[in-house]
Amino acid sequence: MDIGGIAINADAGFIDGNLGLLKKELAYYREIGFSHVELGPHGVGAIVGGRLVRERLREVQALLAGQPLGVAVHGPNPLNLMNRCPAANDREGFLSSLEFTAAVGATVMVYHAGRYLAEEDFLVAPQPYPTTGEQQAMWESEREELRSMGEAAARCGVAIAVENARPYLNAPHYCYAESLVKLAAMVKEVGHPNVGVTLDMGHAYLSARRYGLDLCEGIAAVAPFVRHIHLHDNFGRCCHSYERKQHEMAVMGRGDMHMPIGWGEVPAREIFARLPHYIGLVTLELRPRYRDHYRDALGAARRILMFKERYAS
């Protein structure tokens, strides 16, 4: 492996458009020893209605220019290239996110893989699940859209990294990328050099436990395409989509906990051992409730990776 640095996510909900808070957080991340930060344009308020807010973009650029951290970008979570709603502006939001990625000096934009059934629709009744034929049409639409976005990404000088999805008890198989094997198949069909994979280890472990999938088989399938990695921990206990109170869920170890690695059961060492040719960043994608443990989380990640980070203070 050639790890170019270890990033921490600037949680979009925590920052919530407050650039003064972001400035303080960036100083904190650097003091701890992170080399990069993963930002979302939605977290800094740089995209509204699908369109890039250029004044806010300039403010973000000025803020980033005053500190030494490198940047990766996480696209807005709701982006869904499978969206069938005629009024959807996912494509516009995606293009704006690519422009934002290039403008802040990042080389990778994370995209949550397209969903047959969007999370915001899980509890809408009645909500018919797409038929097999409809799912195939949505797969083909996602494939063609990703090819098009790959071309746009190439013009921006960045790469798209499609992230594997976390599973839910109340919406089985809502997304093809709950399966690493299917995600690998999608990226292979897209066949564009600027479209790869974000391997989210926590999501992969949850899906393996939820569906009885072979985690090693999945890692082997996506390994050639991995451009970015999210590292965090959980206990592999899937939850319902409406379970959101982390202070309660943590007690029972349920759901996509995004804890520091080593707190749960995600076999990170074994996964990294199956990625010997990976080149890129590792982002510790942690919930803000674990903010006081970021320093220890970074130390644990370094021990797992068994390397001295080139950007460490």
Image (spheres, rainbow, N blue to C red):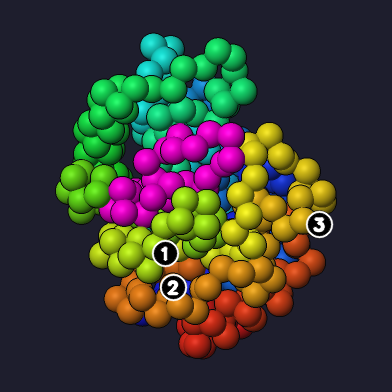
Left or right of 57? Residue 213 is: left
Residue beneath disc 3: 251
Residue beneath disc 1: 215
Instruction: From the viewer's side, name the closer residue of 262 and 22.
Output: 262
Indicate the amino acid at tag 1.
Leu
Q: Earlier in the sequence, mark 1 or mark 2?
A: 1
Q: Is residue 245 magenta?
A: no
Disc 3 or disc 2, which is closer to the eye?
A: 3
Find residue 72 and report its horizontal and vertical position in percent.
Answer: 47, 56
Find residue 10 and report its horizontal and vertical position in percent.
Answer: 63, 54
Residue drawn at (64%, 39%) of the image: 240
Indicate the amino acid at tag 3.
Val
Q: In the figure, residue 180 lies in which quadrant? A: bottom left
Q: Is residue 143 above or below residue 2?
A: above
Instruction: From the viewer's side, name the closer residue of 122 and 143.
Output: 122
Please state the extent of the stretch shown in magenta in the rendering. Answer: 158-184
Q: Secondary structure at mark 1?
A: helix
Q: Earlier in the sequence, mark 1 or mark 3?
A: 1
